[in-house]
């Protein structure tokens, strides 16, 4: 017994170290966000170790003690559908990737073709040939994309669709800066009898707040993605559609196919986040996009290499220019490490994210750009970063 307690407390010590470390850092990682105290309370509640399973509502729950769990699930589904303006919402997927599996398995049959944006153009690695397509027996083709303008090449796409007759055209990127012109894509998918799906993993919070790709569900058969990147967390996935047939196929592919239990505490935390997004999403999302554009401009004027001047970004991401770093003997990896030594956290792939700083109510991008450029010039700015962090408070929670 004593040994076990000891092991647990060692892990808890590491958890505390992590929390201290991250609370002393400025998080600008594009794939992350911070959860409100209310959402965290739900996530670590008693629900975290409970079961609930309703397959046929006339039979009730397969588990006892679930009288509130079902209510939480259904209320969370209702909140999601209402926030995104969709007829149907599925909130149980354990992550964006699991949601993608459910979508692909529900819309395609073996040996059919799909199209997605290539990794070199910012597309999601999971859709590249060696991953989901190989595992499920589909063929994936590239959606032709112009990296300079960050736009799909519609003429080339038309030819590629003619050649490969894809059952599914899957939009969405991990390096995601610009909205798509969906109307012509919908027309092409209708002409070639393809489903059009939108992986909004990175931008679900911005779509919810109507600051980006407001027409996703107007033109696409479904919208799905992660709930923790520009959305308010917790980590998980969500699928939205107006199509009843698609929705029932997705539901069928959940329990005992792509997953079993759905982590009820996670659903409760998502429900809290959906309430917050419903109340404050528009203000939040507008400030995220505004901050990205300003950060792009300010980095550019402080001499740091950023891409896509003069528009920079329509999302929560700003893209760094690898040529700038190479010319100074740096890589994205070493630049990220250098910033982290100064207390600024970004990923190691050249993205800077503005979701979390926006949620923390910050809007002085000139100050952040200055800190980044000073840190990259080799001077440690940890003290200045600490001073800035002291001014931050979580916003958009109501709590
Ligand atoms: C992050 C990401 C995913 C995977 O999401 P998880 O929630 O980590 O499973 C899927 N698609 C895209 C475009 C992503 O950026």
Image (cartoon, helix red, strand yellow):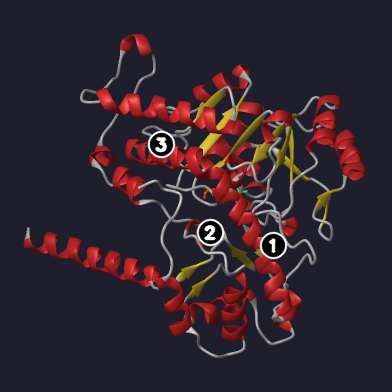
In this view, the residue in front, 25 or 327, is: 25
Vertical relation: 215 (above or below) 117: above
The residue singled out by tag 1 in the image is 293
- Quadrant housing the N terminus: bottom left
Mark 2 vs mark 3: in front: 2
- Residue at 39%, 36% in the rendered image: 267
Determine if residue 236 is in view: yes
Residue 62 in the image: x percent, y percent? 28, 20
Quadrant in the picture for residue 393? bottom left
In this view, the residue in front, 110 or 251, is: 251
Calculate the distance from the C-alpha at mark 2 to the C-alpha at mark 3: 21 Å
Whether disc 1's CB lies below 8 Å from ligand 1 is answered: no
Mark 3 vs mark 1: in front: 1
Residue 181 relative to residue 78: left or right: right
Q: Are marks 1 and 2 in contact (CB under 8 Å)?
A: no
Quadrant in the picture for residue 365? bottom right
Calculate the distance from the C-alpha at mark 1 to the C-alpha at mark 2: 13 Å
- Residue at 70%, 56% in the rendered image: 122
Q: Secondary structure at mark 1?
A: helix
In this view, the residue in front, 1 or 175, is: 175
User: Which residue extends farthest bottom?
Assistant: 379
Give the numbered dot on residue 302.
none
Looking at the image, is mark 2 or mark 3 earlier in the sequence?
Answer: 3
Residue count near mark 2 (Cα–Cα under 10 Å), binned few <14, some 14–19, many ≥20: many
Residue count near mark 1 (Cα–Cα under 10 Å), binned few <14, some 14–19, many ≥20: many
Q: Secondary structure at mark 2?
A: helix
Residue 120 in the image: x percent, y percent? 74, 59
Quadrant in the picture for residue 24? bottom left
The residue singled out by tag 3 in the image is 271
User: Which residue extends farthest top?
Assistant: 58
Determine if residue 317 is in view: no
The residue singled out by tag 2 in the image is 358
């Amino acid at each position: 017994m004593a040994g076990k307690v000891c092991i647990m407390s060692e892990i808890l010590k590491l958890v505390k170290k992590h929390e201290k470390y991250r609370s002393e850092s400025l998080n600008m990682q594009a794939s992350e966000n911070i959860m409100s105290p209310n959402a965290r309370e739900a996530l670590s509640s008693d629900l975290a170790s409970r079961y609930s399973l309703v397959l046929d509502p006339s039979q009730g729950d397969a588990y006892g003690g679930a009288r509130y769990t079902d209510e939480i699930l259904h209320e969370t589904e209702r909140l999601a559908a209402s926030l995104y303006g969709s007829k149907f919402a599925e909130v149980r997927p354990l992550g964006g990737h699991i949601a993608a599996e459910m979508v692909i398995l529900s819309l395609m049959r073996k040996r059919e073709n799909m199209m997605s944006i290539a990794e070199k153009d910012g597309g999601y690695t999971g859709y590249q040939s060696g991953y989901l397509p190989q595992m499920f027996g589909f063929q994936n083709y590239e959606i032709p994309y112009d990296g300079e303008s960050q736009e799909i090449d519609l003429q080339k796409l038309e030819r590629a669709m003619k050649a490969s007759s894809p059952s599914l055209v899957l939009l969405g990127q991990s390096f995601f800066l610009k909205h798509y012109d969906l109307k012509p894509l919908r027309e092409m998918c209708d002409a070639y009898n393809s489903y059009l799906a939108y992986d909004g993993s990175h931008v679900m919070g911005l779509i919810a707040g109507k600051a980006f790709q407001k027409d996703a569900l107007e033109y696409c058969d479904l919208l799905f993605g992660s709930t923790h990147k520009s959305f308010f967390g917790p980590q998980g996935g969500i699928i939205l559609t107006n199509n009843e047939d698609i929705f029932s196929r997705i539901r069928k592919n959940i329990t005992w196919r792509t997953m079993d239990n759905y982590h009820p505490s996670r659903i409760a935390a998502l429900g809290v986040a959906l309430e917050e997004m419903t109340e404050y999403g528009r203000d939040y999302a507008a400030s995220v996009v505004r901050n990205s554009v300003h950060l792009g401009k300010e980095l550019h004027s402080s001499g740091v290499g950023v891409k896509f001047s003069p528009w920079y970004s329509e999302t929560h991401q700003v893209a760094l220019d690898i040529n700038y770093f190479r010319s100074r003997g740096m890589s994205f990896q070493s630049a990220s490490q250098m910033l982290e030594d100064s207390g600024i956290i970004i990923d190691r792939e050249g993205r800077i994210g503005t979701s979390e700083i926006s949620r923390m109510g910050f809007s002085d991008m000139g100050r952040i750009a200055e800190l980044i450029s000073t840190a990259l010039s080799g001077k440690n700015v940890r003290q200045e970063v600490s001073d800035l962090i002291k001014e931050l408070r979580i916003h958009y929670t109501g709590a």
